[in-house]
């Protein structure tokens, strides 16, 4: 999302911020439900993003469609999006998805007590999302089941919840949304995006660390300290085992990759010899 759509989303997130301290999962579920309605109608998407129609007219259309069916907050948020400008018909849906996920993430953040493991609500949410993705990515059978077009959304949600039985209510909402309404993305990609939003919420970055074998506690501690110093902030480390690396380590933070693997060095040597 770029240009005018990015500006509209930024404004919507800023307006949402005032609602987040008292946000509820019900509000997020309502916004996800509205997203389903928008995604199901190409005509509605065009009407809500038509640059020839003024913002008040589009906002009024939203209020007419969902007024009285969802909370006043959900109507206000959605009508605000409709009144903004969008570069493409899909962008308003992407924005609505981001706002709904942001509400879920705020609910996790607002939990005053820490869990029994000592993790904050946001950290627990991130861990649940990572655990789900790792489970799905480790099984081709599960991947096929979650992408089966004949399976009902309810069946996919039921399967997903069995994969992470101890997940928080917030994680279940986001995972359920991803498996029932992936919107053209792989389920794990969308869940990963939700995890990225959670990490951004606590002003941390996710460092995806690929190694040939699991790191020891000492190695993890040293890596954490080195990466935190390198990037000037505390990172959330997501460590995965990738035997294809042969040896060494590969770290990705956002779009930046620090590749110190044997595979990378072999590739560099091959390019030099070519």
Image (cartoon, rainbow, N blue to C red):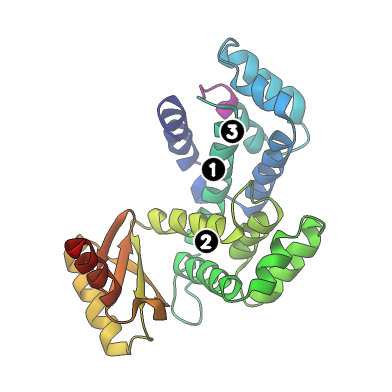
Residue at the spot x=62%, y=37% of the render? 73
Numbered marks: total:
3
From mark 3 to mark 1, how far is it between C-alphas?
15 Å
Instruction: Give the answer, above or below, for where 78 lies relative to 181.
Output: above
Residue 208 in which image quadrant: bottom left
Q: Which mark is residue 99?
A: 1
Q: Which residue is nearer to you in this view: 98 or 133? A: 133
Nearer the observer: mark 3 or 2; the answer is 3
x then y, percent, for residue 243? 40, 81
From mark 1 to mark 2, how far is it between C-alphas?
15 Å
Mark 1 or 2, nearer chain start: 1
Q: Quadrant of the C terminus?
A: bottom left
Residue at the spot x=41%, y=59% of the render? 199
Q: Which mark is residue 108?
A: 2
Based on the picture, tell me whether residue 163 belongs to the magenta stretch. no
- Mark 3 sits on what residue? 90
Nearer the observer: mark 3 or 1; the answer is 3
Residue at the spot x=54%, y=37% of the render? 95
Mark 3 or 2, nearer chain start: 3
Is disc 2 surrounded by few (<14), some (14 to 19) or many (20+) residues within 10 Å? many
């Amino acid at each position: 999302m770029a240009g005018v759509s990015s500006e509209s989303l930024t404004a919507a997130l800023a307006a949402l911020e005032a609602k987040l301290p008292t946000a509820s999962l019900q509000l997020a579920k309502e916004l996800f439900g509205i997203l389903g309605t928008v995604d199901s109608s190409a005509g509605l998407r065009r009407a809500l993003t038509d640059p020839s129609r003024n913002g008040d007219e589009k906002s009024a259309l939203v209020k007419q469609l969902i007024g009285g069916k969802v909370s006043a907050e959900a109507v206000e948020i959605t009508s605000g999006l409709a009144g903004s400008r969008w570069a493409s018909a899909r962008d308003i849906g992407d924005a609505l998805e981001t706002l709904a996920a942001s509400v879920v993430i705020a609910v996790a953040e607002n939990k005053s007590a820490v869990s029994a493991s000592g993790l904050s609500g946001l950290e627990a949410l991130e861990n649940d999302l990572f655990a789900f993705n790792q489970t799905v990515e480790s099984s081709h059978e599960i991947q096929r089941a979650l992408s089966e077009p004949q399976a009902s959304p309810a069946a996919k949600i039921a399967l997903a919840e069995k994969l992470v039985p101890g997940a928080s209510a917030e994680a279940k909402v986001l995972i359920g949304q991803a498996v029932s309404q992936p919107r053209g993305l792989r389920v794990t990609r969308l869940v990963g995006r939700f995890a990225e939003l959670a990490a951004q919420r606590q002003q941390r970055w996710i460092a995806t660390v690929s190694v040939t074998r699991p790191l020891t506690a000492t190695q993890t501690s040293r890596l954490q300290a080195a990466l935190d110093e390198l990037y000037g902030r505390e990172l959330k480390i997501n460590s995965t085992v990738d035997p294809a690396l042969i040896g060494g380590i590969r770290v990705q933070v956002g779009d930046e990759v620090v590749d110190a693997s044997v595979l990378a060095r072999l590739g560099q040597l091959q390019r030099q010899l070519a």
